[in-house]
Amino acid sequence: MPKFKYQAINQKGQRSNDTLEAHDRKAALSELSKRGLQVFDIKDISAGASRTGNSSEISLGFLNGKKNQKISSEEILLCVQELSTLLNAGIPLADAVLNIAKGHENRPSGSVLSSAYTSLRSGSNLATALRSSGLALPEYVHELVRAGEETGKLGASLQSAAQQMESDAAFRRETRNALTYPMVLIASGLLATLVVFMFVVPKFANILTNPKAEIPLFSRLILQSGLWLVNNKFFAAAVFSGIIISVYYLFSQKSFRAQLWEAASGFPITKNWIQHVELARWASMFSVLLQNHVPILDALHHSLNSLTGQSWRSRAELIAKDVKSGHSLALAMQEHQFIDAVGLNLIRVGEQSGKLPQTTSSLAQMHRVHAQQSMKQFLILLEPLTILMVSVILGGIMISVMLAITSLTNVI
């Protein structure tokens, strides 16, 4: 009979290290659970087990090296989608988690999923197991899991969570794709400007040494800048690299991105787009939570995580406080100017008819369409503005060089 070595914690919180004989890993975990032990590591130490590679177990020791690796949002979404699919197909919860963990055993997510499986086998529910596993799930996913376990519709709740996560990921992809072309134009413009400064402008720098040449101030500055770049190319490269690294670091900080988003919400060009994006994401998450029987106060609280701008989050917090004190949701939104008249009518009708999840879902779809239209309008303005900016910079440099050349006519 196979022998298993385990590490566990008993009901008094004391660590226990021992061995156990059982028919298989599942039987060993079941026996340890009956003893009141919470297992966090278990291995088959039978002779030849390490060589045969028993497919029914997940070696936590093998995955410990991946525990501290960052798990991508795409991999997390894939795990949630797989778990939802297996549960909706009638696979028992523990077996579903085990199968997914085995499928991801060569990835960082395999470690946390095996940890969740161990927690499930020791008697924990899925919500507790996922929280303790260290899988970086959005907060609303934990709430949907809890609601799904309470209502007996865990598969449907996880499916809703996966759809919401996919919607969030799609928004991020659309934003990145939309800004790719303008960013390429700006980068090309900067590169072209650098090439002109480094290789073209210095060719005419000797004009500066001619005392009879009446060079305009703008042309003189351009020529001197090009000459300085050639003479200090290594220092300029270091400064430019430092700027790139600093910008990358700033954009990697969530607080900076939030401040930038808040500032952009005040610009006329981006104001409408950001408003529709914020409302679409909030309404979508709020609708998903309500459809899965999450209480309205909890749904309002967790929907805050979908809002990026601090002003929007502040208003949403005030709305949640008003609803908690007895106000209707529509009245609270109206007082804090959260949505427009059309949205208020949808919320009011939903509250009166008892179909708030459906009306907020319609609200999310409406703002999602408006957000896409606003994005297109924004890009229609952004692309020609970017081209114009690059053209003005390059054209200004060439004009300054030509003015410097024509100033030599006085010498001739």
Image (cartoon, grey):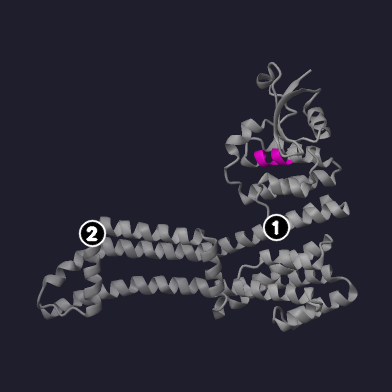
- Magenta part of the protein: which range? 110-116
Dividing the picture into quadrants, the one containing residue 289 is bottom right
Residue picked out by circle 1:
139
Q: Label 1 sits on what residue type? A: Glu
Q: Residue at the spot x=78%, y=62% of the render?
A: 288
Q: Residue at the spot x=75%, y=28% of the render?
A: 56
Mark count: 2
Instruction: Tell whether 283 sits left or right of 406.
Output: right
Count neighbours of disc 2 (C-alpha within 10 A) and say few if under 14, some if 14 to 19, many if 20 or more: few
- Residue 386 position within the rendered picture, expressed as x and y whole percent measured from the top left: 46, 71
Instruction: Tell whether 256 sits left or right of 5.
Output: left
Instruction: Tell whether 408 sits left or right of 375.
Output: left
Closer-to-camera residue (329/392): 329
Q: In the orientation shown, which residue stands out farthest toward the right?
A: 353
Instruction: Tell whether 371 sits left or right of 25.
Output: left
Dividing the picture into quadrants, the one containing residue 411 is bottom left
Residue picked out by circle 2:
232
Vertical comparison of 12 with 237: above or below: above
| SS under mark 1 | helix
Main secondary structure type of the part rendered in magenta: helix
Vertical comparison of 51 with 374: above or below: above
